[in-house]
Image (cartoon, helix red, strand yellow):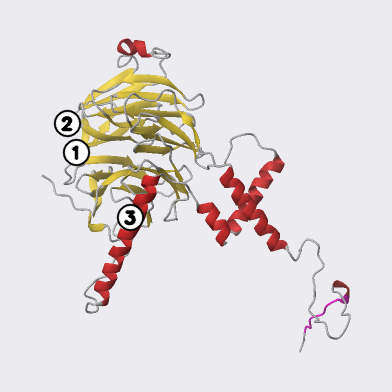
Amino acid sequence: MKIKTISRSADNYVPIRNTQESSLPRNLNPALHPFERAREYTRALTATKMERMFAQPFVGDLGKGHRDGVYCIAKNLSTLNAVATGSGDGVIKYWDMAIRDESASFKAHYGTVAGLVVTPQSQMLSCGADKTIKLWSVNSADYRGVDDQEISNKRGTNGLLKTYLGEHSFQSIDHHRKESMFVTGGAEIQLWDASRSKPVTNLSWGSDNITAVKFNMTETNIIASAGSDRSVVLYDIRTNTPTQKMVATMRTNAIAWNPMEAFNFATASEDHNGYLWDMRNLSRSLNVYKDHVAAVMDIDFSPTGEELVTGSYDKTIRIFKTRDGHSRDIYHTKRMQRVFCTKFSMDAKYILTGSDDGNVRLWRSNASARSLVKSTRERNKLEYDEALKDRYKHMPEIKRIARHRHVPIAVKSAGEIKRVEMEALKKRVDNQRRHSKPGAVKYKSERSKHIIGTAHGHRDDK
């Protein structure tokens, strides 16, 4: 039988001076200092304070903005510094974010621009309540340098490539990621081929009015739609049939697909919350994004799929980690009105918002980050600070400093009222369950109680 014994060298330990002292060994390695954790905690606390001191999220606005409210923003997925916006007076603008000024501007529609998208060919598709869809070129030199005095001569004529006529007004539009087809929402969901003047297919499934349509960015044959009847419906354009339907307690205002996880999408709801869904099971949401105190008007994923940004009727925007239920940051300005659209930039470093005051604002996604060229030493220091903050983020003082935000008094007051109301509702349900027969009051989780019902793969053909 072979036995291994533990052997220790006396050279690695301090010898015992007298018999009264403890014989516990002490590590003399200078890298393992006895106050290591205390030092790291102090550094993490300092890094958290410095982060809040240098938090300046607002970069600036784009050009002179619009004359009316900005109600839709579209990203160019093939470039980092281009974005298109549409306003309530029917004007669409194509912006160069590098110089923060417009490179093209058109009088596109009579009335509000209801939908806007940038095609893979870097062209713009717009739709409105005037029953038209228009295709615009942003590469022409005819309209560059247009002044406000030349609006009547230039806008609405140069740059227009094609016009599609519909039978009713449109409320949303989205383009296929690769092929030359697009989908529109209004009284019906219609699938269009860019080379044809009439819609190819009608995908409607028992909805009064379609307010949002979105192509899946990975599984490009899947379309998600939100209707005024509080429904969210998924369609497959390969079979031209709906696959799933979910009806919620309140209306959905916007839809965004996760660019990295093909099955997941997020919705912005009228009940002050955002929701994360798995398209394979709509009977329960994956996550609930809280903290807003008014209707969430728009939602968008970052290109990495790790974060979301929401714009709300309460005049603020919030940034969420995809797996967290509460926002990590809130942005607002004194002059920013109700936010109707918001988008991440294609490098995930910036956020664009369009609000009721006509301005298109540019924000940093990380409030304390800077885009300057950093030396290796500075980069290593920032990475070290981030690791320390993540390690000690649950310590009370660090958590308090990192979470503290100054919010407008109206938002703060509404948040306190909402918190009292939600606690009262929860207490009432608990009392009902406590004083009822076992099983009489069914428990519904936070992620499923906003769902009224679901349906699968059945279509009521007219």
Assign a secondary structure to mark 2: loop
State the residue position of label 1: 188
| Position of the C terminus by quadrant | top left
Residue 160 lies left or right of residue 51; in this view the side is left
Which of the 4 image quarters holds residue 288?
bottom left
Residue under circle 3?
A: 417
Which amino acid type is marked by label 3? Ile
Q: On the image, numbered disc 2 is attached to which residue?
A: 168
Three-letter amino acid code of the residue under disc 2: His
Q: Counting residues from the N terminus, which is met first, the one under dot 1 or under dot 3?
A: 1
Q: Which residues are magenta?
A: 4-10
The chief SS type of the magenta part is loop
Within 10 Å of the Cα at label 2, are there few (<14), some (14-19), or many (20+) other Cα atoms? some
Front in this rendered view, residue 436 or 278 = 436
Question: Is residue 289 one of those drawn in magenta?
Answer: no
**N-terminal label among 2 and 3:** 2
Amino acid type, callout 1: Glu
- Spot occupied by residue 336 in the image (x, y as percentages of width and height): 39, 35
Closer to the camera: disc 2 or disc 3? 3
Element at badge 3? helix
Q: Quadrant of the N terminus?
A: bottom right
Q: Which quadrant of the view contains residue 323?
A: bottom left
Marks 2 and 1 in Cβ contact (< 8 Å): yes
Query: Against 323, is 26 above or below?
Result: below
Residue density around tag 3, few if under 14, some if 14–19, many if 20 or more, within 10 Å? few
What distance separates the C-alpha of mark 2 from that of mark 3? Answer: 42 Å
Vertical placement of residue 366 versus 362, above or below? below
Q: Earlier in the sequence, mark 2 or mark 1?
A: 2
Kindly report the distance in space between the C-alpha atoms of the residues bearing marks 1 and 3.
39 Å
Q: Residue at x 66, y 51 (%)?
A: 384
Which residue is rendered at x = 32% and y = 55% of the image?
Answer: 418
- Give the structural element (helix, strand or loop) at label 1: loop
